[in-house]
Image (tube, rainbow, N blue to C red):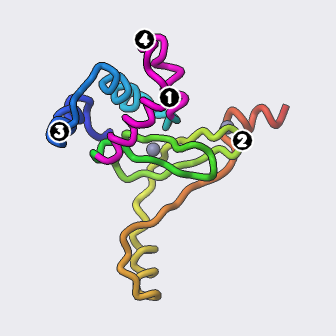
């Protein structure tokens, strides 16, 4: 796993972002969950403890974290963005039915980047690769 909450807080401080209880809660939630939540999901889970917090607040804070390089925004498909606090190299499997995103490890496809660069003359900066299908849960439901 990547950075700890403590490290993330230090990094935020360096970028001049003031830490508030809400920001702390959002960051902790993201780093503890492996589910790549949407702003909505974070809202549902945190709002009992922060009644004054809105989805917009959460979204703005997520933006801030993305800009500070603490969190990655995943924009797959046309659904709302999901957020990932695990910044290490990994790939995602995405369920076409429920939108769940699951991490999996696979060696970075650097060979593809090399070939692409050679054949196109591009200075390659990166690539995206996602696996699509049905998650275990949705697959079971569809069989019944
Ligand atoms: Zn699913
Ligand atoms: Zn991930």
Local crowd size for mark 2, using a 10 Å CA cut-off: few (<14), some (14–19), many (≥20): some
Cα–Cα span, label 2 and label 4: 31 Å
Q: Image point 36% across, 31% down: which residue?
A: 31
Task: Specify whether tag 2 is near ligand 1 (CB below 8 Å).
Answer: yes
Residue that appears at 31% across and 47% down? 67
Q: Nearer the viewer, residue 37 or 89?
A: 37
**Cβ of mark 4 under 8 A from ligand 2:** no
Mark 2 and mark 1: Cα distance apart in space? 24 Å
Check residue 16 in the rendering and tell me which mark sits there, or answer none: 3
Nearest to N terminus: mark 2 or mark 1: 1
| Residue of label 4 | 49
Mark 2 touches mark 4? (CB < 8 Å): no
What is the quadrant of residue 52 in the picture? top left
| Looking at the image, residue 106 lies above or below residue 39 | below
Determine the secondary structure under disc 4.
Answer: loop
Q: Which residues are magenta?
A: 39-67
């Amino acid at each position: 796993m990547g950075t700890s909450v403590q490290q993330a807080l230090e990094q935020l401080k360096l970028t001049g972002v003031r830490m508030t209880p809400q920001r702390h809660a959002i960051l902790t939630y993201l780093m503890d969950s492996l589910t790549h939540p949407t702003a909505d999901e974070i809202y549902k889970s945190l709002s009992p403890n922060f009644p004054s917090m809105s989805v917009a607040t959460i979204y703005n804070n997520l933006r801030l974290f993305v800009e500070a390089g603490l969190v990655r925004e995943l924009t797959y498909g046309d659904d709302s963005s999901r957020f990932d606090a695990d910044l290490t190299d990994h790939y995602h499997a995405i369920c076409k039915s429920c939108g769940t995103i699951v991490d999996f490890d696979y060696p970075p496809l650097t060979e593809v980047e090399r070939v692409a660069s050679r054949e196109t003359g591009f200075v390659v900066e990166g690539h995206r690769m996602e696996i699509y299908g049905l998650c275990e849960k949705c697959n079971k439901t569809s069989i019944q």
